[in-house]
């Protein structure tokens, strides 16, 4: 069990800055996700924690103690890598025992631990099989099991299930949440899959090009994205963004060509100029009336529990997610409204959110 910290950490590889000025505190027993696109520095953060890389600047701390000079084995983390590798000539039992044999543990202790972990991961029936005879999901469980048999300070996992198919990933997500609760250990989990990050994490950080864009609970990140980048990067289908202008004197946001004029609430620290409204697809309301923005149905994608509808309002394309299976004709004229309480407003040049919520003027 451990609290992990990166304080002002920068790591460069030659002329590439892999991560810059990372400030991150991962609490004891927390399920913490690092979420970001490929190349944004996720693996580098794990390797810095592990001690496989040394920061150029800043400090790595475990339970408040600076460990920059502590070699990897002494940090006692268990790692599951992106490209899992089981020993092909060893059975599942031997694979699971390996980390413990390396540590010269007594045979009966090893047997007991391997038994417990196999039980937890529901792989007891596989113990005498070779990796070649396992499915992808089973192999992944064994790889995770191999990190669980030890009693580490924390578990670090680097996209451990990204290679599995969608259904298995869903199953493993649930398993991982359960495991983390049962193990009661700090788990740092790297993923580029937003569903994974949002569903398993106690908290997550969203990364952008080697820097932290936002840290928060999944709800905070989804409901109060700090910037257009975070708003766009979290949420599927992605948030609708429409360019407009902000009038600071009137605290008003307008999209002239759509006839949209909205009064923004609160003290706004935002100058006149170009601004962007963000509306999540589930906050777009489509009606057969004359009241809202005039639009046409462009595409209808029924998905059972909900339907994705593309609408065209002038030059603008918007996407709505409507519960159930509403019936619309292609080309049908409709009226569009937004759930104004949930709309976000971003500065066009910096991308920073300056307001959430609006009312009709
Ligand atoms: N050993 C290395 N040598 C040179 N460049 C590296 C090395 N490791 C990572 N990088 C670079 O650092 C950046 C971040 O990489 P990485 O942490 O692997 O990203 P992610 O895991 O988010 O995909 C990338 O631009 C990558 O090319
Ligand atoms: Mg990586």
Image (cartoon, helix red, strand yellow):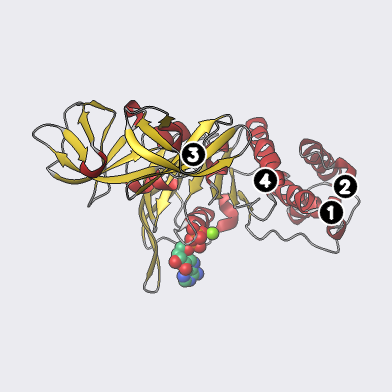
Mark closer to the observer (1, 3): 1
Which residue does the image show at 51% across and 32% down from the upper left?
322
Q: Earlier in the sequence, mark 4 or mark 1?
A: 1
Say which of 160 and 342 sits in front.
342
Q: Earlier in the sequence, mark 1 or mark 3?
A: 3
Task: Look at the numbered disc 3 and give the secondary structure of its residue.
Answer: loop
Q: Which residue is mark 3?
A: 3
Q: At which x and y percent is residue 222?
A: 43, 36
Pointers 2 and 1 in contact (CB under 8 A)?
yes
Q: Residue furthest left?
A: 249
In front: mark 4 or mark 2?
4
**Residue 306 in sight here:** yes
Count how many numbered circles sit on residues in the image.
4
- Asked whether the beta carbons under mark 1 and mark 3 sit within 8 Å of each other, the answer is no
Q: Residues within 10 Å of mark 2 (few under 14, many from 20)?
A: some
The dot on residue 126 is 2
N-terminal-most mark, 3 or 4: 3
Alpha-carbon neighbours of circle 3 within 10 Å: few (<14), some, or many (≥20)? some
Q: Which residue is under mark 1?
A: 134
Residue 169's tag is 4
Q: CA distance from mark 3 to mark 4?
A: 28 Å
Determine whether the beta carbon of the residue marked 4 sits less than 8 angstroms from the nearest atom of ligand 2. no
């Amino acid at each position: 069990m451990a609290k992990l910290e990166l304080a002002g950490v920068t790591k460069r590889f030659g002329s590439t800055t892999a991560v810059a000025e990372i400030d991150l505190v991962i609490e004891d027993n927390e399920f913490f996700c690092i979420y970001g696109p490929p190349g944004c520095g996720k693996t580098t953060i794990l390797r810095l924690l592990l001690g496989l890389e040394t920061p150029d600047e800043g400090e790595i701390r475990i339970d408040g103690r600076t460990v920059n000079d502590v070699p990897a084995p002494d940090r006692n983390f268990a790692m599951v890598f992106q490209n899992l590798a089981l020993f092909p000539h060893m059975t599942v039992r031997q694979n699971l025992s390996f980390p413990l044999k390396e540590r010269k543990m007594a045979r009966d202790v090893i047997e007991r631990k391997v038994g417990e972990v196999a039980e937890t991961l529901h792989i007891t029936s596989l113990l005498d099989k070779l990796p070649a005879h396992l499915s992808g999901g089973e192999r992944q469980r064994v790889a995770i099991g191999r990190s669980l048999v030890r009693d580490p300070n924390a578990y670090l996992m680097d996209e451990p299930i990204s290679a599995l198919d969608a259904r298995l990933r869903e199953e493993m997500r649930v398993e991982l949440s359960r495991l983390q609760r049962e193990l009661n250990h700090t788990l740092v989990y790297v993923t580029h899959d937003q569903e994974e990050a949002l569903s398993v994490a106690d908290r997550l950080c969203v990364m952008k090009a080697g820097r932290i864009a936002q840290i928060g609970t999944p709800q905070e990140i989804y409901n109060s994205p700090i910037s257009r980048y975070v708003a766009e990067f979290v949420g599927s289908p992605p948030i609708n963004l429409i360019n407009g202008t902000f009038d600071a004197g009137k605290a008003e946001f307008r999209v002239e060509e759509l006839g949209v004029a909205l009064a923004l609430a609160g003290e706004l620290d935002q100058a006149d100029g170009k601004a962007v409204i963000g509306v999540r697809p589930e906050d777009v309301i489509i009606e057969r009336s004359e009241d809202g923005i005039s639009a046409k149905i462009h595409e209808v994608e029924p998905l059972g529990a909900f339907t994705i509808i593309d609408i065209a309002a002038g030059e603008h394309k918007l996407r709505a997610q409507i519960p159930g299976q509403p019936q619309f004709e292609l080309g049908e004229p409709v009226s569009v409204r937004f759930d104004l309480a949930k709309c976000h407003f971003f500065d066009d040049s910096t991308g920073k959110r300056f307001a959430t919520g609006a009312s009709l003027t």
